[in-house]
């Protein structure tokens, strides 16, 4: 079923795009710095297959931190929550996504949650396989299973750019290795994590993933439980408490839906029982979230009364 452009969404996008000038693209990853700062698009995917959109929804972008939700779902399904949460906690941090401070000041070496970089690196470390290629293929196959899109791949240029500039993530990994939360070659893990973050899709595919989480892991189009309901519930809870970095509390008050952002400018939203949202707007605020994307979601939430609270 084609995704139809929607006049009301177009007006909201036009209004929200004005805020893009107040942010900046993530140029600390050189390949991401090439994006058009004023780009903004949205797709909304309903359980019955309908889709409405505004903006260039065919434009592809990399998942970046949105991939943390997917890798978490994957390892929870593979290993079970008891084992996974031995390595990573369940609490929000209130610190930037790449901060090391809580690793030192709280339970030594154990990341507080899977949505910060330290926690996501531990989760990625838990993906089984003999080689980086094998482990990444397992994760990518899982993304293809979720989306039903077998053409999905990753952006090689962005993955390489991230790999070459991931010194802070390397520092996090060495700290985690010192405390026995990681026990593999750090360069291999950074390679795997860089490829994971560089998985590429458009707003429509992202909205489809959001819809599947909104439906508790069930895909009504294929009539299949893709992700166990309990795993989907855990992932959505992390999206609410930690999904928008250290702006998650404000986001919950103003918008009030499970969501996850990435520094490419993507936002995945899951409105429980209703629909999924995919947004791309590469201009970021100081927290690393799409500045126009958040404004767009805020206006949409008010208009449609989306808040779950």
Image (spheres, grey):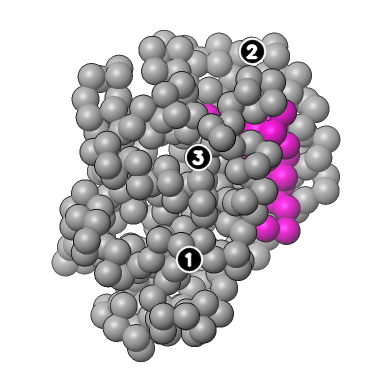
- In the displayed structure, 231 sits above or below 10; it is below
Determine which of the numbered discs, if any, sits on residue 6 in the image: 2
Which quarter of the rendered picture does the C terminus lie within?
Answer: top right
Q: Earlier in the sequence, mark 3 or mark 1?
A: 1
Residue 295 magenta-drawn? yes
Q: Earlier in the sequence, mark 3 or mark 2?
A: 2
Image coords of residue 147 (percent x, y): 34, 32
- Asked where in the image residue 281 lies, by quadrant, the reply is top right
Give the left or right position of residue 88, taking residue 164 as reference. Answer: left
Which callout, 3 or 1, points to the residue nearer the camera?
A: 3
Identify the element where label 3 is drawn.
loop
Q: Earlier in the sequence, mark 1 or mark 2?
A: 2
- In the displayed structure, 110 sits above or below 248; it is below
Residue with the most extreme front position: 309
Q: Are marks 3 and 2 in contact (CB under 8 Å)?
A: no
Say whether residue 22 is visible.
yes
Whole-angstrom CA distance, mark 3 to mark 2, is: 23 Å
Determine which of the numbered discs, if any, sits on residue 117 in the image: 1
- Asked where in the image residue 112 lies, by quadrant, the reply is bottom left
- Identify the residue position indicated by label 3 in the image: 258
Residue extent of the magenta highlight: 276-299
Q: Which residue is at a point 22% across and 29% down the rendered structure image? A: 225
């Amino acid at each position: 079923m084609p995704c139809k452009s929607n006049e009301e969404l177009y007006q909201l996008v036009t209004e929200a795009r004005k805020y893009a000038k107040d942010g900046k693209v993530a140029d600390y990853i050189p390949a991401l710095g090439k994006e058009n700062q004023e780009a903004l698009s949205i797709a909304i995917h309903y359980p019955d297959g309908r889709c409405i959109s505004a903006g260039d929804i065919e434009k592809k972008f990399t998942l970046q931190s949105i991939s943390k939700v997917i890798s978490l779902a994957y390892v929870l399904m593979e290993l079970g929550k008891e084992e996974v949460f031995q390595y990573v906690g369940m609490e929000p941090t209130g610190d930037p996504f790449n901060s090391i401070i809580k690793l030192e000041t709280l339970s030594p070496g154990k990341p507080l949650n899977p949505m910060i970089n330290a926690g996501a690196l531990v989760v990625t470390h838990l993906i089984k396989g003999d080689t980086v290629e094998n482990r990444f293929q397992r994760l990518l196959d899982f993304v293809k299973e979720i989306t039903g899109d077998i053409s999905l791949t990753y952006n090689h240029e962005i993955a390489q750019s991230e790999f070459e500039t991931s010194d802070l993530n390397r520092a996090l990994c060495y700290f985690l290795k010192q405390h026995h939360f990681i026990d593999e070659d750090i360069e291999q893990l950074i390679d795997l994590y860089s490829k994971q973050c560089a998985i590429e899709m458009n707003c429509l595919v992202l909205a489809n993933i959001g819809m599947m989480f909104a439906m508790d892991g069930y895909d009504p189009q294929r009539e299949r439980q893709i992700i166990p309901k309990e795993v989907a519930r855990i992932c959505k809870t992390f999206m609410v408490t930690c999904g928008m970095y250290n702006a998650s509390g404000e986001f919950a008050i103003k918008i009030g839906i499970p969501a996850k952002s990435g520094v490419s400018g993507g936002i995945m939203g899951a409105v429980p029982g209703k629909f999924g949202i995919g947004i791309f707007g590469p201009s970021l605020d100081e927290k690393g979230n799409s500045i126009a994307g958040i404004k767009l979601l805020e206006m949409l939430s008010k208009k449609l009364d989306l808040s779950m609270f």
